[in-house]
Image (cartoon, rainbow, N blue to C red):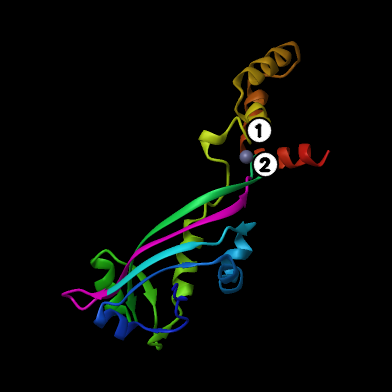
Amino acid sequence: MKERIPQRIDYHRYTEQGVKLDGIMSKTECDKDLPRLNEAIIDNTGDIHYHLAFDTDVLGNRYVTGQVKAQVVLQCQRCMDDFKLDLKCDISIAFVKNEFEQNQAEDSGYDIFWLETKQLFDPRVLIEDELLLALPQIPMHLESEIGLACDVTVQIIGDKSNLTEESHINTDDTMTGDTMNSAEQNDKENPFAILKQLKNK
Ligand SMILES: [Zn+2]
């Protein structure tokens, strides 16, 4: 019933015939077929939903639009716990093989997928690219989850009452306002290093 995603498609034929690909990649397929994504995440939960519609427009751009949805497991860089994140990518990509096509496609508002010499490509590469782009640079629990999973961290970094307490202690000390500020800045610049130290204790 469920068709596997093709491993090679001819983008000329697909965009000319308006082919649509709808389906789900299982966990086994994700584990095997998306090595770059798997390297960037703790785990995938499988079931990557893809909907890809190939077409050409009046200017001759060959493009694919659609959506890719997946759930991945990442490590929160604030509390170092794993958490699940839903990724949803809206796709609007033109296939280009030279600068002329690139310029035209960019003017039309498409993202670019280079296929310089090949007419055949693996759609899983495109899906993987999009999911990689959708990953957060610094994975962290969403704000709504703070307080549940990120409890420790909120106290250390976010809790202002802690800072007030600190500044009380420091007024008794010989510390000037300037050194306080720079100490605070250092904390801000490298909060994760401090957390790691705490974790390792
Ligand atoms: Zn967290």
Q: Establish if 150 lies above or below 99.
A: above
Magenta-span inclusion, residue 185: no
Of labels 1 and 2, the one closer to you: 1
Name the image quarter holding the C terminus. Answer: top right
Residue 18 percent location from the top left of the image: 26, 77
Residue 190 percent location from the top left of the image: 65, 40
Q: Which residue is mark 2?
A: 192
Secondary structure mostly seen in the magenta stretch: strand
Task: Determine the quadrant in which ligand 1 lies.
Answer: top right
Q: Quick one: label 1 or label 2, which is nearer the N terminus?
A: 1
Q: In the visual, does 68 lie left or right of 99?
A: right
Q: Residue visible at 61% across and 52% down?
A: 74
Decide which of 154, 1 is in the foreground and name it: 1
Q: Is mark 1 within 8 Å of ligand 1?
A: yes
Q: Which residues are magenta?
A: 55-76
Q: Residue visible at 64% across and 45% down?
A: 77
Considering every residue shown, the one lying at the far front of the view is 1
Considering every residue shown, the one lying at the far right of the view is 201
Q: In the visual, does 106 lie left or right of 33?
A: left
Q: Establish if 141 lies above or below 9.
A: above
Residue 105 percent location from the top left of the image: 27, 71
Decide which of 169, 36 is in the foreground and name it: 36
Q: Which residue is mark 1?
A: 153
Q: Residue visible at 64% across and 16% down?
A: 164
The amino acid on which the numbered mark 1 sits, given as a three-letter code, is Thr
Would you say the residues marked 1 and 2 are in contact, meaning their CB atoms lie under 8 Å apart?
Answer: no
Mark 2 closeness class: few <14, some 14–19, many ≥20 residues within 10 Å: some
Magenta-span inclusion, residue 58: yes
The amino acid on which the numbered mark 2 sits, given as a three-letter code, is Phe
Q: Which mark is residue 42?
A: none
